Image (cartoon, helix red, strand yellow):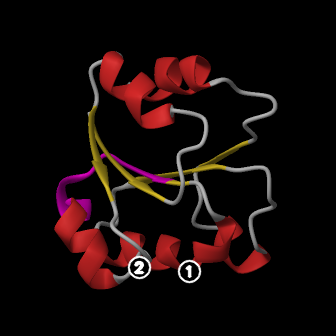
Amino acid sequence: MNIVIAGEDDEGLAATLEAAGATVRRVDGVATRNSLSAAGIDDADVFLLTDMADATAISVAKNQNPDVRVVTYATDSLPEFARAQADLALDPALFSPDLVAEELA
């Protein structure tokens, strides 16, 4: 499973996903078309967003890879404009990194 993560990883989700066998790539800085491409969004199975301030990246990721599964992992609410494109929205207060890794990897 190839996973691209955009945003902070305060919960240690990337390490947990890697321990579960996933290949994790990080977006450097703001998730733009170029940074998503550099992180491998074209071949990703999952785009994991942890910062809802960067929610516009969801449509960019879907535009580049229509088959990518979009998962948000944040305490903030997903903006209305991005809800239709997200496949799964998880709150870190309710779902530990281990549970997320079990579901995704």
Residue denoted by label 1:
56
From the viewer's side, name the closer residue of 50 and 78: 50
Which secondary structure, mark 1?
Answer: helix
Residue 66 figure quarter: bottom left
Q: Residue at x 33, y 57 (%)?
A: 67
From the viewer's side, name the closer residue of 22 and 26: 26
Q: Type of residue at label 1?
A: Thr
Callout 1–callout 2 Cβ contact below 8 Å = yes
Q: Up-down: is 6 above or below 45?
A: below
Residue 14 figure quarter: top left
- 71 lies left or right of 33: right
Which secondary structure, mark 2?
Answer: helix
Q: Type of residue at label 2?
A: Val
User: The C terminus is located in which quarter?
Assistant: top left
Could you say where residue 63 lies in the image, as x and y percent from the top left?
A: 35, 78
Residue denoted by label 2:
60
From the viewer's side, name the closer residue of 25 and 88: 25
